[in-house]
Amino acid sequence: MESTFLTGRTALVTGAAGGIGRACALALAEAGAHVYVVDRAAEAAREVAAKCGGTAHVVDMSDMSAVDALPDDADIVVNNAGLQHIAPVHEFPPEQFALIQRVMVEAPFRILRRTLPHMYAQEWGRVVNISSVHGLRASAFKCAYVTAKHALEGLSKTVALEGAPHGVTSNCINPAYVRTPLVEGQIADQARAHGIPERDVVEQVLLERSAIKRLIEPEEVAQAALWLCSPAAGYLTGASIPLDGGWTAH
């Protein structure tokens, strides 16, 4: 695969200031794309943009007017931004449930609603939705996150069907637990929810269902995203790629 096969393309990556989004932004830029680095963390977003030669867009993804003001000329969209809250359904705050749907479902929809016409006009586009193994399976205490990821899967497949006649593919990547601040930040909540010490969360909760007993690295997810934008993946659409260490093999 030619290293600069995305030269002349523009990519919009949400949640790009850290974790998976940052890794995706850097990988796409290295392949030649100009990257819109979208995140609410202003300083970190600008640092990533400077590092990859992209453009920072400081946006709170729960603010739909700000989301609607993002550029609409992206050839590649990576819907990655997300958040987590751990609680049983009967204790889950409704406002937190609504926030997670807004950031992880409505914002991707709004971004695609505005960028797909550009992709259709040029008869080429790539939509990469960073879903999760929780887009394919459920876990206790994560009702909002699991619901959002399942919804993102449906949005992705619908875009795949509508985009196919226009040269646009849409796929999901479904990693298990990734070594990111989002995952590391939920260890204490997981310990409380499961009634176990924090030191046991990684082994007993995060890695319990994976055959490969380690967290996946953000760069591994980014390489899958990059491949989905390559000529080699031009016939793949409407798919969900489980980078889950064997979780869904059970």
Image (cartoon, helix red, strand yellow):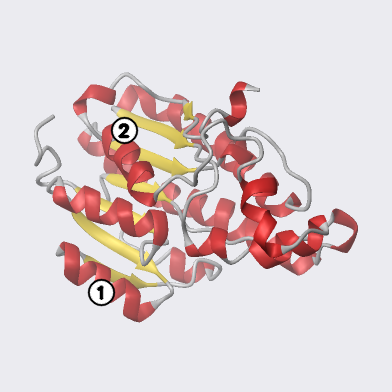
Q: Position of residue 140 (x, y in %)?
A: 78, 47
Q: Earlier in the sequence, mark 2 or mark 1?
A: 1
**Camera-side residue of 27 and 57:** 27
Binning the other alpha carbons within 10 Å of mark 1 as few (below 14), some (14 to 19) or many (20 upward) gives some
Q: Are marks 2 and 1 in contact (CB under 8 Å)?
A: no
Q: Is residue 185 above or below residue 124?
A: below
**Camera-side residue of 130 and 186:** 186
Q: Is residue 160 above or below residue 78?
A: above
- Residue 47 is labelled as 1
Dot 2 amino acid type: Leu
Binning the other alpha carbons within 10 Å of mark 2 as few (below 14), some (14 to 19) or many (20 upward) gives many
On the question of residue 73 being in view, the answer is no
Dot 1 amino acid type: Glu
Kindly identify which residue carries mark 2.
228
- Left or right: residue 154 compared with residue 78: right
Q: Position of residue 98 (x, y in %)?
A: 71, 61
